[in-house]
Image: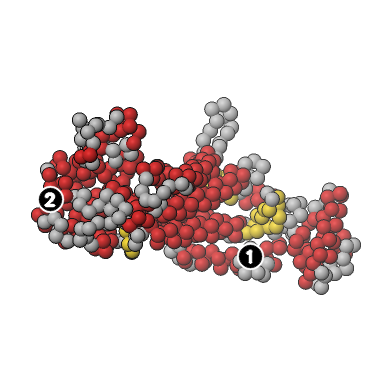
Amino acid sequence: MNKKLWGGRFDKAMAPEVERFTASIGFDRLLYEHDIRGSLAHVEMLARAGLISRAESKKISSGLKRVREELRKGTFQPGPEHEDIHMAVEARLKKRIGPVADKLHTARSRNDQVALDLRLFLRDEIGAIRSCIRRLQRTIVGVAWENRDVVMPGFTHLQHAQPVIAAHHLLAYVEMLQRDADRLGDCLRRVNMMPLGAGALAGTSLPIDRKYVAKLLGFNALCENSIDAVSDRDFALEFLAAGAIIGVHLSRMAEEIVLWASREFSFIQIDLSYCSGSSLMPQKANPDAAELVRAKSGRLLGSLVSLLTVMKGLPLSYNRDMQEDKEPLFDAAGTLKSCLSIMAGLWERIKFRRAEISRSLEGDFSQATDLAEYLVMRGCPFREAHQMVGELVADCIRRDKKLEALTLRDLCSRSELFDRRALELLRPGEGVTRKKSVGSTAPAEVSKALRMWKKKLGMGNA
């Protein structure tokens, strides 16, 4: 009978189909670096506490490092018989150094061990994802800086609303991404808590030093309750929730890129290296990279819902259901990094089509709000101003006439408060220069925001 490391109580081998069904080594192999990092700290603590000798500690540590190298090089390939990465490492260690390897698992359980590995994994991944966010922010700020003089339509309900500076629109994405980075930073505080020492659920009677292990591994705090330490996956859910929001932000960004690149908009041109062609239609250059980013938001949302569903009915403390936490986490982390990187590369290869954008403002009536606010500045109640300018627009539509083609006489037919200065507001895009509120699309406000972001992102002040 193939004896498991936990098999003392069993007089039957696990059924092959159950062994295959319950094995997680196919995906949790990804945790081997984190598992061995945690084991090295654990062994150091065991020796310091007198639970193993210094010689044993040195032998186990040396063996663990050899196993790590084998896993890195692929010369050791764990199989289903190992169940999970923790058992695979321990079994390989015993083969390498003999019975002394049996002391590695002193004062710990796979329950607190896997909780530790996941926290170490997420700590690393959050750092990598935040770096990807920063790169994307820097890229978008660079594009915004290059297009700080471009005035484009701003949209509500996907209809022309008011003119805005293109850089102002792009900086909205940068703000969104900053909230994403901050959200992950806040999540990191709860990820960076050390569960090892909780054992299976009740702690241990052995004289371990949890604070020492936390210090060795760079954790800021301990998980205080041993039951909660092994049964908590809030930190994983929080990461997935943050990841889902990032996915939604990237999807919205990708959607605008797809729209703007279409013939109907023609606002941007995407480099062909980030497009694909059609197997049938020779003329096509499809924005597939953006479309796939848009689609992959579904995976990120699905990962969150998957783990929420796993956790929603579990009694305390650890249950094997929680093995299902890893694949959503691994997939979400990988998806986030790839999507963020692709979006950065995509923005680096986007060119704004200035002439087409300028033409799109002609005859779109987006100056209407500026005309109404002009009347307000002349003493007219806003609702009256809104009504009068609305009537002007309706009259233009009936006469198939552009707002910018109106004369002073046309304006005064609706209100004597209009004067020759109002004619300036009829020029497409003129209204952006009149904005005064903080955070608006006024050129001075946009320039201030660009300088702030360039400084914050380490891009210098241009």
- Name the amino acid, label 1: Ser
- The numbered disc on residue 145 is none
Q: Residue furthest top?
A: 280
First along the sequence among labels 2 and 1: 2
Packing grade of label 2 (10 A; few <14, some 14-19, many >=20) is: some
Quick one: quadrant of the N terminus?
top left
Can residue 11 be seen here? The reply is: yes
136, 303: nearer the viewer: 303
- Name the amino acid, label 2: Lys
- The numbered disc on residue 59 is 2
Q: CA distance from mark 2 to mark 1?
A: 65 Å
In what element is the residue under mark 2? helix
In what element is the residue under mark 1? loop
Residue visible at 64% across and 41% down in the picture:
263
The percent position of residue 232, horizontal first and vertical second, equals 39, 53
Quarter of the image for residue 16 reads top left
Q: Is residue 424 left or right of residue 65?
A: right
Residue visible at 32% across and 53% down in the picture:
201
Label 2 or label 1, whichever lies nearer to me, is 2
Q: How is the image coloured?
A: secondary structure
The percent position of residue 462, horizontal first and vertical second, equals 50, 65
- The numbered disc on residue 440 is 1
Q: Are marks 2 and 1 in contact (CB under 8 Å)?
A: no
Q: Is residue 29 above or below residue 377?
A: above
The percent position of residue 80, horizontal first and vertical second, equals 28, 34
